[in-house]
Image (tube, coloured by chain):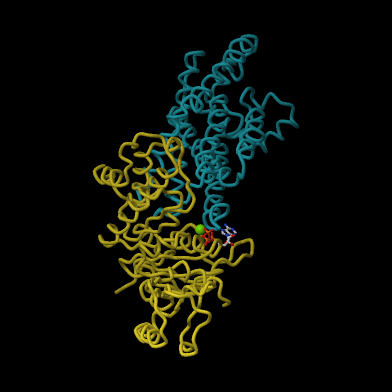
Chain colours: A yellow, B cyan
Amino acid sequence: MQPAIAIHGLSKTYASGLTALRDVNLEIRRGEIFALLGPNGAGKTTLISIICGIVTPSEGRVLADGHDIIADYRAARAGIGLVPQELSTDAFENVWDTVTFSRGLFGKPADPAYIEKLLRELSLWDKRDSRIMALSGGMKRRVMIAKALSHEPRILFLDEPTAGVDVELRRGMWDMMRRLRDSGVTIVLTTHYIEEAQEMADRIGVIRRGEIILVEEKNALMAKLGKRQLTLTLNAPLARIPQMLQDYRLELSEDGGRLVYTYDNREHGGDIARLLQRLGEVGIEFKDLSSSESSLEDIFVSLVHSPS
Amino acid sequence: MNLYGIRAIYLFEMARMRRTLMQSVASPVLSTALYFVVFGSAIGSHMVSIDGVSYGAFIVPGMIMLALLTQSISNASFGIYMPRFTGTIYEIHSAPISYVEIVLGYVGAAATKSILLGAIMLATARLCVPFQIEHPLWMVAFLVLTAVTFSLFGFIIGIWADGFEKLQIVPLMIVTPLTFLGGSFYSIDMLPPFWRTLSLFNPVVYLISGFRWSFYGVADVGLPLSLGMTALFLVLCMAGVRWIFRTGYRLKS
Ligand SMILES: Nc1ncnc2c1ncn2[C@@H]1O[C@H](COP(=O)(O)OP(=O)(O)OP(=O)(O)O)[C@@H](O)[C@H]1O
Ligand SMILES: [Mg+2]
């Protein structure tokens, strides 16, 4: 199946001489939620801005729904919606007019029923006649989302959509993203809340200093790189780890009361039973046992800090 | 052709004018009325008529031209400067709309405003002094041509400007003086030869002369020259806009 977005050899050097993207190759699949993660200044916004026509690429080629974003920009852009990172709105316009404006700008005939549905879905219906400057930050963010969806795009870019949005609303937005995805919309999302990517994404891309350093299915990534830990609370403290258990990556807590076993999901997942058996053999008894899984956040931090 | 897009920009800009009705219509009308009281009635009553036209009537085309030029420039420059300033221009860039369509929307709206304003001022003037328009079609043609040309010019200024001061500087420091010196209140034939020749380098002279000719059939320079100079400036402005969008100058990084 043709990808929603295909990026080939994309580079960007700004007039200042700063290279924000280096030879980026990436395919976004149709109908997926793709989370683009990376530290501040990594090039996420630059990448999105190029695809949406706001920044001119220095090199390379991008196809959106099979349309070249430069040669065939009309067809490419008509299917794309963008919620930019910066909150920039026409302060003096009201909500209804500004959303209607966006739809027209993207070449679609007016459809008040659709705009009403959109505003209701984003809990903005009561605010439709308010001037944008009279809205709170979170409401403005939702107005930006309404503008981006006003022309019923097939591909949606969300550049940190939930920054400054309260918890309840964030969950509402996640639900909305899922509904959009289920209706066939492809979503590309950047976020600094790793938890959000973990919650929402089908695939994850990590960008660092303008280079894509990893693209993976979220689940595969978690399984591959995720570490698990098994913590045993012992009945009696140990002075040191017995010789017989040297083969295992075990750590003893300072007071000797807890034993921590760290293992990779892919390697020693099946070793737990044998470890517990060994413990029984050497006479170590425990009263409690808990396991934990490293989060995407841990994975992300270790990736971004690892030397290239 | 993205007609809905052009319409969206046009209506957005017209709505902005409705919000700022006082500033965009009332204030130029008021200042024009003041000019008529001072120059037309108070001073004009002591002036001889020029080329057989009473002084009060003589200054009507120049007055309208002055307002037309400054308003076209400030409307159009403000119209494109604001989205650049607030950042909402991202949406224009990301829309499936060509630069010609963008310009049609913004410049079309700015020109519409100035033409409306010109019509209102004409009506205001008619209340103050009696005059006739000999060539009404030419009058409308000059009005539209000038409004479009200077709205384009304003559009360029709105993209060039990187602060509110620069937005004001061109209309205030260049266009207004050129208009005053371009024969709004006098015929350049009244000047000594040296100043008269110098005036011919002032492009506004041709606009005012042509416009005044459409009213009274008298002109400082010939009609073809007036038309030609106006058209030349129009073409220059179009080339400027084209260059801006081709290179992304101050619009895209
Ligand atoms: N218009 C510009 N001119 C020059 N340099 C720019 C411009 N925009 C961005 N940059 C630089 O390009 C690099 C990438 O910026 P970008 O905004 O793409 O990062 P980001 O990944 O979106 O970061 P953040 O998480 O902070 O939003 C940064 O070093 C930034 O300073
Ligand atoms: Mg960013």
Who's the residue at 42% across and 87% down the image?
A: A282
From this view, report whether residue B92 is shown above or below residue B15: below
Who's the residue at 74% across and 27% down the image?
A: B192
From this view, report whether residue B157 is shown above or below residue A23: above
Instruction: Tell me where residue B178 appears, x and y as whole percent.
Output: 65, 33
From this view, report whether residue A49 is shown above or below residue B51: below
Q: How many marks?
A: 0
Instruction: Tell me where residue B35 appears, x and y as whole percent.
Output: 59, 18
Who's the residue at 53% across and 24% down the image?
A: B28
Is any part of residue A51 visible from this angle? Answer: yes
Who's the residue at 36% across and 65% down the image?
A: A201
Q: Viewed as shown, does residue A46 lie left or right of A178?
A: right
Instruction: Judge by depth and name the residue closer to the eye, B237 or B19.
Output: B19
Picture quarter containing residue A182? bottom left
Q: Viewed as shown, does residue B191 lie left or right of B216?
A: right
Instruction: Tell me where residue B191 appears, x and y as whole percent.
Output: 71, 26
Instruction: Judge by depth and name the residue closer to the eye, A107 or A198.
Output: A198
Instruction: Tell me where residue B225 appears, x and y as whole percent.
Output: 57, 38
- Tell me the quarter of the image containing the C terminus of chain B: bottom right
The residue furthest left is A113
Is any part of residue A231 visible from this angle? Answer: no
Q: Viewed as shown, does residue B11 lie left or right of A46?
A: left
Picture quarter containing residue A159? bottom left
Picture quarter containing residue B140? top left
Instruction: Judge by depth and name the residue closer to the eye, A13 or B144.
Output: A13
Instruction: Judge by depth and name the residue closer to the eye, A15 or B42.
Output: A15
